[in-house]
């Protein structure tokens, strides 16, 4: 399933809350009821825009319209972020920011709005999820700040939020790999118009494929190196440094940007063959440029990382 041409299934899994990680934030009996009793349970998750959860006896009365709910069509539960209200009064933290919690809603109590009409990554089905005046018991809500690390002491449970961007970055890296492989297959049989020479025998093609391969492998190595380092630190110390968090953002953004560059390089030498819908390169080109718009993979993350490095250099 993860080998789909556009990475749709992988994207849905990466863009959804991992079952085990969510279990670390709710009561054990709740986690068991949702995931333990149903081996086919799937959780979709959305952050924006936050819904409205009014505090009532025993839980919350929730109304929301969450966007970009990847995997929502085959999910059994949805987890959406909500701002908390006491009647009409928003609940605030000590610093004045909204007090928020995730609400777990079974699919029977939510509806979908077909909004995912997009240029690429269509298979993720990232539609809007709507709940209207739905009661959510308090034990079906959680925050990412209160994981039960005594019950779940492994490195993953200290890291899984920070690992979100690298998880997502695996999708464009896979697309770039698929683009190179598809082009190599094409170049072995295709000739340019009015030429008897196969594409694979042209120096410019060989150079482009060599450069694309080097770029992809380097980006993948940076991602693996960064994840491996933070995994070791989290396992030994139970937390990671601010610089390691920055590097996780950076390696993910770099992986996505490099993957886009690779696909564009392949597209450039593929010719008109890549334009037709039956070509895997046509779909990969659309999908890779859709991935670029994800907030965790976009070029804005280079600015964020650069600013963090510069601020640390001043201290």
Image (cartoon, rainbow, N blue to C red):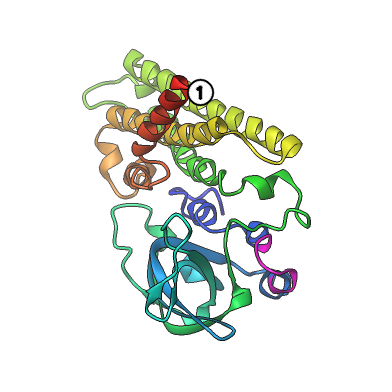
Residue found 31% across the figure and 26% down from its top: 191
Q: Is residue 154 left or right of residue 90?
A: right
- Measuring from the top left, give residue 71's x and y in whole percent: 48, 63
- Nearest the viewer among 91 and 12 is 91
Q: Position of residue 293 (x, y in %)?
A: 33, 46
Relative to the observer, which residue lies in front, 231 or 181?
A: 231
Q: Quadrant of residue 139?
A: bottom right
Q: Quadrant of the N terminus?
A: bottom right
Give the SS element for disc 1. Answer: helix
In the displayed structure, does residue 205 sit left or right of residue 193? right
Q: Is residue 276 left or right of residue 108?
A: left
Rendered residue at 60%/77% (across/down): 138
Residue drawn at x 41%, y 58% is 96
Magenta-span inclusion, residue 24: yes
Q: Which span of residues is magenta-colored?
A: 23-30
Does 34 sit above or below residue 279?
below
Is residue 257 in sight in this rendering?
A: no
Residue tagged 1: 218
* Left or right: residue 40 compared with residue 271: right
Farthest top residue in view: 203
Could you tell me residue 166's position as x and y percent?
53, 40
Can residue 66 be seen? yes
**Residue 66 point in image, percent of width and height:** 39, 68
Depth check, front residue: 8 or 303: 303
Which residue is pictured at 44% across the width and 33% down the height? 185
């Amino acid at each position: 399933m993860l080998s789909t041409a556009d990475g749709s299934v992988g994207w849905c899994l990466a863009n959804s809350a991992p079952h085990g990680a969510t279990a670390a934030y709710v009561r054990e009996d709740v986690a068991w009821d949702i995931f333990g009793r149903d081996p086919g349970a799937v959780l979709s998750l959305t952050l924006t825009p936050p819904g409205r959860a009014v505090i009532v006896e025993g839980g919350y009365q929730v109304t929301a319209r969450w966007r970009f709910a990847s995997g929502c069509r085959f999910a059994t539960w949805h987890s959406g972020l909500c701002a908390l209200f006491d009647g009409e009064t928003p609940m605030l933290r000590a610093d004045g920011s909204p007090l928020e919690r995730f609400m777990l809603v079974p699919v029977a109590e939510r509806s979908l709005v077909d909004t995912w009409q997009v240029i690429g990554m269509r298979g993720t089905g990232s539609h809007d999820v709507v709940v209207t005046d739905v009661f959510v018991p308090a034990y079906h809500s959680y925050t990412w700040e209160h994981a039960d690390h005594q019950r779940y002491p492994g490195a993953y449970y200290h890291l899984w939020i920070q690992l979100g961007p690298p998880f997502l970055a695996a999708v464009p890296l896979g697309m770039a790999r698929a683009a190179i492989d598809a082009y190599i297959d094409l170049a072995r049989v295709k000739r340019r118009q009015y030429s008897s020479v196969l594409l694979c025998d042209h120096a410019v093609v060989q150079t482009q494929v060599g450069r694309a391969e080097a770029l992809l492998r380097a980006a993948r190595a940076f991602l693996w190196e960064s994840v491996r380092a933070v995994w070791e630190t989290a396992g030994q110390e139970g937390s990671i440094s601010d610089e390691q968090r920055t590097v996780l953002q950076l390696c993910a953004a770099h992986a996505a940007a490099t993957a886009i560059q690779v696909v564009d390089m392949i597209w450039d030498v593929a010719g008109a063959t890549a334009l037709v819908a039956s070509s895997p390169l046509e779909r990969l080109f659309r999908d890779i440029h859709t991935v670029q718009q994800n907030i965790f993979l976009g070029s804005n993350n280079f600015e964020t990382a650069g600013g963090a490095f510069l601020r640390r250099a001043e201290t």
